[in-house]
Amino acid sequence: MERVEEIEFAIDELPPEKYRRIVQWLRVREDKRWDEQMDRDCCAGTLDFLFEEAESESAKGLLRDWPPLK
């Protein structure tokens, strides 16, 4: 059995409280990794096209509030 399968099996065997703890830990970890990747992409200029597109759409009056105002 490879390591990932061992981990999956161990997670399946956890009681609900410990399972929720693992899920929360993974969510926090993934959020942090996502933020770090976004920071790297932003600093590298990879996301510049998004800013340019947003500025262009804004100048044309095509942007909407999100979430929509009620």
Image: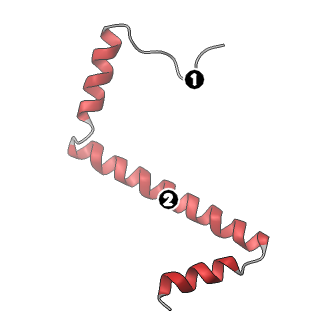
Image coords of residue 58 (percent x, y): 35, 13
Residue drawn at the location 27% of the way across and 16% of the way down = 56
Whether 42 is drawn above or below 8: the answer is: above
Residue at image mark 2: 30
Estimate how packed mark 1 is, as few (under 14), some (14 to 19) or many (20 or more) residues with alpha carbons within 10 Å: few
Apparent side of residue 32 relative to residue 20 in the rendered image (left or right)? left
Apparent side of residue 28 relative to residue 58 in the rendered image (left or right)? right
Residue sitting farthest toward the front? 1
Q: Quadrant of the C terminus?
A: top right
Whether 36 is drawn above or below 60: the answer is: below
Residue sitting farthest toward the left? 45
Residue drawn at the location 32% of the way across and 8% of the way down = 60
Q: Nearer the viewer, residue 25 or 14?
A: 14
The kind of residue on which mark 2 rests is Glu
Task: Assess whether mark 2 and mark 1 are in contact (beta carbons under 8 angstroms).
Answer: no
Image coords of residue 44 (percent x, y): 21, 46
Question: Dividing the picture into quarters, in which one does residue 62 lie?
Answer: top left
The kind of residue on which mark 1 rests is Pro
Callout 1: helix, strand or loop? Answer: loop
Callout 2: helix, strand or loop? Answer: helix
Apparent side of residue 63 relative to residue 31 in the rendered image (left or right)? left
Q: Nearer the viewer, residue 51 or 8?
A: 8
Whether 24 is drawn above or below 9: the answer is: above
Residue at image mark 1: 67
Residue drawn at the location 58% of the way across and 18% of the way down = 68
Distance (Cα) linking label 1 and label 2? 24 Å
Residue drawn at the location 72% of the way across and 78% of the way down = 14
Q: Earlier in the sequence, mark 1 or mark 2?
A: 2
Image coords of residue 54 (percent x, y): 33, 22
